[in-house]
């Protein structure tokens, strides 16, 4: 289950909900494919981990785009 407090903080940081959903979804797929979490705090689900990484500035949209090109 996702944490509403993380979602609320993420929306405050990135008001464009479409961009935010795209970024979080791509990072969740990377985590599901075995990527190492970048956040020091462990979360119960991949969506929470991706949100936490975004809030800690550990992941950006340009980073996700570059990793797709390398595959």
Image (spheres, rainbow, N blue to C red):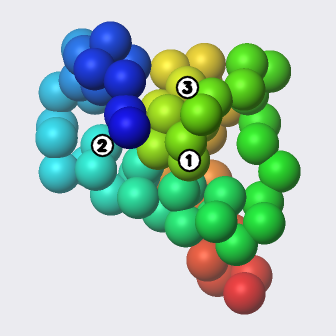
Q: How far apart are marks 1 and 2 (CA)?
A: 15 Å
Query: What residue is at 17 percent from the left and 51 percent from the top?
Result: 18
Whether 9 is drawn above or below 52: the answer is above
Label 1 Cα crowd, 10 Å radius (few <14 / some 14-19 / many 20+): many
Of the numbered discs 1 and 2, the one sitting upstream in the chain is 2
Would residue 54 be seen by someone viewing this image from the given angle? Answer: no
Whether 69 is drawn above or below 45: the answer is below
Query: What residue sits right under mark 3 in the picture?
Result: 52
From the image, state whether disc 3 or disc 1 is nearer to you: 1
Query: What residue sits right under mark 2 in the picture?
Result: 20
Label 2 Cα crowd, 10 Å radius (few <14 / some 14-19 / many 20+): some
Side of 9 where 27 appears, left or right: right
Residue furthest to the bottom:
71
**Residue 24 x/y as whole percent:** 42, 49
Of the numbered discs 2 and 3, the one sitting upstream in the chain is 2
Side of 37 where 46 appears, left or right: left
Whether 9 is drawn above or below 70: the answer is above
Of the numbered discs 3 and 1, the one sitting upstream in the chain is 1
Query: What residue sits right under mark 1 in the picture?
Result: 46
Would residue 43 be seen by someone viewing this image from the given angle? Answer: yes
Query: What residue is at 38 percent from the left and 38 percent from the top?
Result: 1
Badge 2 element: helix
Whether 30 is drawn above or below 39: the answer is below
Badge 3 element: helix
Side of 39 where 36 appears, left or right: right
Q: Distance between the residues labelled 3 and 1?
A: 10 Å
From the image, state whether disc 1 or disc 2 is nearer to you: 1
**Residue 9 x/y as whole percent:** 32, 13
């Amino acid at each position: 289950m996702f944490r509403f407090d993380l979602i609320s903080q993420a929306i405050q940081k990135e008001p464009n909900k479409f961009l935010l959903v795209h970024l979080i979804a791509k990072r969740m797929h990377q985590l599901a494919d075995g990527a190492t979490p970048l956040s020091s705090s462990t979360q119960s689900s991949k969506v929470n981990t991706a949100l936490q990484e975004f809030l800690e500035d550990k992941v950006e949209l340009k980073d996700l785009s570059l990793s797709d090109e390398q595959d």
